[in-house]
Amino acid sequence: MDKNLKNDLLIRAALSQPTERPPVWMMRQAGRFMKEYWEIKNKYSFLEMCKTPEIAADVTMLPIDLLGVDAAILFSDILVTAEAMGGDLSFEQGVGPRFSNPIRTVQDAENLSVDCLDKLQYVGDAIKVIQGRLDGKVPLIGFAGAPFTILSYLVEGGSSKDFKLTKTLLNNQPELAHSILQKIADVTVNYMNMQIEAGVNALQLFDSWALALSWNDYHEFSHKYNKYIISRLNRKDIPVISFCKGSSVFAPVMAEAQPDVVSVDWNADLLNIKKSLPSNMAVQGNLDPFVLYADKPVIKKKILDLFERMRGENGFIFNLGHGIMPDIHFDNVKYAVETIKEFRY
Ligand SMILES: Cc1c2[nH]c(c1CCC(=O)O)Cc1[nH]c(c(CCC(=O)O)c1C)Cc1[nH]c(c(CCC(=O)O)c1C)Cc1[nH]c(c(C)c1CCC(=O)O)C2
């Protein structure tokens, strides 16, 4: 464990060691629900923010300075790997991510580059700037998108409600799907190892849309590649968190890839999931993010209910089941963090 960390709650919990309270961070903790985010976003495009290390560091630091969470997460996006491979990525206000050159044919797949780590150097640079700013205050979480989720964006050309094109590809042209997934997996291994080299303290693999897959397809098109990636990380003592929406169902399969932590959506009982995993595997989650729209006493009660349920368990990191929505009130998020930080086992 990194001796230079002043607050190592997240690392201890991820490695299933005792903590005096659950550590807290939240997916999308540096984002549109903060007016300070908009003050920066109004001056730059989202990709400019990601690609300028000083700006990425400014945004990464917002939830550390304003919310007091126990971990920072690198300000970037899961889709930067797809861009480096050749996807023509833009983020449009109100539309979300778009690839103007969606991947559909064997030729499109062949055109995807694997040798593209140099294009992601700005992420390594940002990690170094952020670590300089953090100065050991809390750990820094790096991350990447998992191959199936990245494939879905590349094939659909953006976000999708039903993943119709992606699932049709998996059904009709599984070899083509596998060739793309393998390329993404190789890029992701190099990219995550580069983040370790640059100095992250933990890593999260985001397979957000795995819940779209059937049990068999999850094994074949998602889990196989996540396992491939996790087994090739030079993780030393750097914990690896595996996230997907669908983890209520897929958690036992996710565990076979041997992450340190399984991040759980809000459909499952977290203790039941924890008990179903190997004893040294931690869980992260799993408050329904919509609770943060509720009144403060409700927020407090739901957090304390979760903590009572998890009492006595090592290996528990508080998080939401998915990211904070942009219109959630900052005050409510801050209140949730304060409630968690006051709690003691
Ligand atoms: C699926 C996914 C994406 N990106 C990400 C995922 C996986 C997590 C999840 O399931 O939500 C991961 C991500 N995206 C972002 C981060 C930064 C760190 C953090 O605060 O969590 C992280 C870890 C910033 C972002 N990524 C994006 C924004 C908003 C950019 C803006 O200001 O318009 C931010 C702060 C844009 C983005 N990026 C993506 C979408 C669909 C969108 C637009 C819609 C949306 O926000 O949900 C793809």
Image (spheres, rainbow, N blue to C red):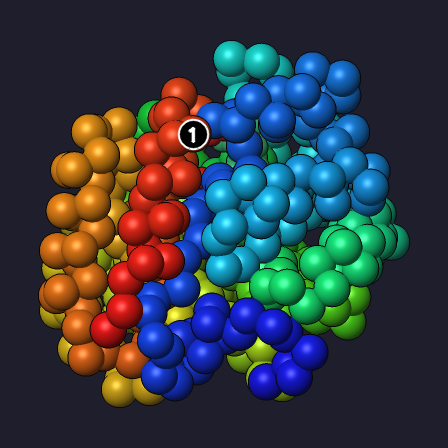
Q: Of residues 287 and 21, which is closer to you in this image?
A: 21
Q: Residue at x 55, y 70 (%)?
A: 7
Residue pointed to by mark 1: 330
Left or right of 254, for residue 153: right
Q: Quadrant of residue 39?
A: top right
Regarding residue 305, the answer to whether it shows in the image is yes
Q: Of residues 337 and 51, which is closer to you in this image?
A: 337
User: In the rendering, at what x and y percent does residue 126 appear?
Assistant: 79, 50
Regarding residue 150, the answer to whether it shows in the image is no
Q: Of residues 243 and 333, which is closer to you in this image?
A: 333
Q: Amino acid at mark 1?
A: Phe
Image quadrant where one finds the N terminus:
bottom right
Compared with 257, 289 (above or below) is: above
Image quadrant where one finds the C terminus:
bottom left
Q: Residue at x 64, y 50 (%)?
A: 74
> Can you name the residue that lies furthest to the front here?
342
Left or right of 328, for residue 179: right
Q: Determine crowd level at label 1: few under 14, some 14-19, many 20+ residues with C-alpha closer than 10 A.
A: some
